[in-house]
Amino acid sequence: MRAQCFPVAKAFTIPEMLAIVAIITIILSILLPAVGKAKKVAYTAICASNQHQIGVAQQGYLVDSRNVYPTMTNWVDLVGMKGGTGFYNSANLNVKQRVLDRYLDSRHDDMEVPIAQCPSDLGDSLNGSVPNSYKAYGTSYLPQWAGDVFRVKYVYGVTNDPSRPSMTKWQITSPSNKLILADWPWHGNRIVSDKQTHWHSNGYERQFNVLWADIHVSFFTFPVNEIDVSVTGTYSPAPPNPSHTYW
């Protein structure tokens, strides 16, 4: 009987294996930046959606308060969960003490408040390089409270201080460019050269999601020479002006 022959599989040589690895490396080097960019765009969109929902909750509050914005005891009172630090009294402000949480169906003190968390949150360089604003303060979003700074008129008054009342809806004569809140590092004392300021942007631009009084959200670029204290040397380089691109 004649023996049956089977073809012998040819193994890859070392040069062929190196060539395959090189090709895969080149493909990955092309694809990975695109994947990273898509992830950043997706996170920016989620953050914008969060801010819009906060804006919708704010409208519910205005209906109940006869169109007067809420007062706050500190920067973090508006929305979020109990924080993990003593900054801004965050650790003492639970869900029930944050003004808009009940309009977001967040009623239990042991709950997290996902709407208050930006997935691109890199923390806050101002307070000892806090690594994550949501975990530290209970929120990723900084409203304009108590005073006029960085060219923006304050919206939220100080609780139990009649000299600093909240704005009313009717006082906002130009709602489409009236800043209500934005990503936490938007204030110009979080300087643009710090990497923690770049939640959504690359390089040296001050780009943040911003919630405006008409409850639309935009990815807004603040001119560095208008609000960044490393450039202007002051917290208030110009007074709020409704005719400006933001106020």
Image (tube, rainbow, N blue to C red):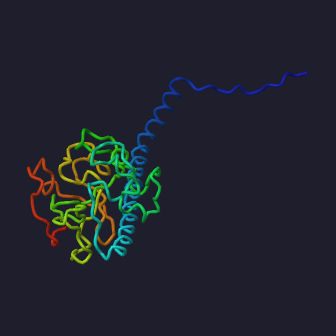
Q: Is residue 1 left or right of residue 115?
A: right
Could you say which is closer to the camera, residue 11 or residue 226? 226
Q: Which image quadrant: the C terminus?
A: bottom left
Which quarter of the figure has residue 47? bottom left
Furthest toward the right, the residue is 1
Q: Is residue 34 left or right of residue 149?
A: right
Could you say which is closer to the camera, residue 60 or residue 228? 60
Q: Which residue sits at x=34%, y=48%?
A: 92
Q: Which residue sits at x=48%, y=36%?
A: 24
Residue 96 percent across, percent down from the top left? 40, 57
Q: Which residue sits at x=40%, y=50%?
A: 119
Residue 50 percent across, percent down from the top left? 40, 60
Residue 85 percent across, percent down from the top left? 32, 42
Q: Is residue 191 above or below residue 10?
A: below
Residue 244 percent across, percent down from the top left? 16, 69
Q: Which image quadrant: the N terminus?
A: top right
Which quarter of the figure has residue 29? top left
